[in-house]
Image (cartoon, helix red, strand yellow):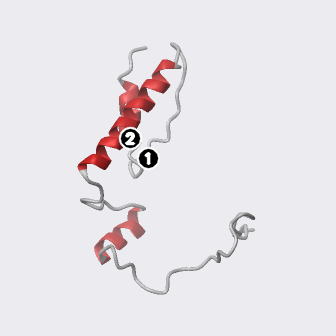
Amino acid sequence: MPRERAPHPWNTGFEWGLPDRAPAAITAKQRAQFDRDGFFVLQGAFDADELSEVEAACDEAVELVAGGVAPGDVVLVKASRAAGLERLALALTEVPA
């Protein structure tokens, strides 16, 4: 039996629903790709400074995780490409044991 969707108790004034119009910020091709693949690439969404912040945060995360891993440990990372975490997972594979 499917679960009924309900907002979190702290989320007041929200009602589930679908938009009544097509998105204005993406193209029909992007929307179709999202519907088909679950993602699409939005070129130019972030400037160089914003990307530098993300890269620095990934480097910091690699250092944090690598500093707490002992030989034989297993590290599970949900390395979502959409969230930019694939870079983090790849970097962790290069950390010496």
Expressed as whole percent of the image width and height from the top left, the position of residue 79 reads: 44, 41
In this picture, is 15 found above or below 2? below
Q: Which residue is mark 2?
A: 86
Q: Residues within 10 Å of mark 2 (few under 14, many from 20)?
A: some
Q: Return the residue nearer the eye: 8 or 1.
A: 8
Q: Residues within 10 Å of mark 1 (few under 14, many from 20)?
A: few
- Comparing 6 with 32, the one in front is 6
Q: Please tell me which residue is depicted at 48% across the width and 19% down the height of the picture.
A: 67
Dot placed on the residue nearer the N-terminal end, 2 or 1: 1
For residue 69, which numbered disc appears in the image? none
Tell me where residue 19 appears, x and y as whole percent: 50, 81
- For the residues labelled 2 and 1, the Cα–Cα distance comes to 6 Å
- The answer to whether the residue labelled 2 contacts the one labelled 1, judged by CB atoms less than 8 Å apart, is yes
Q: How many marks?
A: 2
Q: Residue furthest front?
A: 49
In the structure shown, which secondary structural element does the residue marked by tag 2 occupy? Answer: helix
Mark 1 lies on a secondary structure that is loop
Kind of residue indicated by mark 2 = Glu
Q: Nearer the viewer, residue 63 or 94?
A: 63
Image quadrant where one finds the N terminus: bottom right
Q: Position of residue 90 (x, y in %)?
A: 36, 32
The residue sitting at 43% across, 47% down in the picture is 80
Res 31 → quadrant: bottom left
Q: Quadrant of residue 32?
A: bottom left
Residue at screen point 45% across, 32% down: 61
Residue position marked by numbered label 1 in the rendering: 80
The residue at 73%/67% (across/down) is 3
**Rendered-image quadrant of the C terminus:** top left
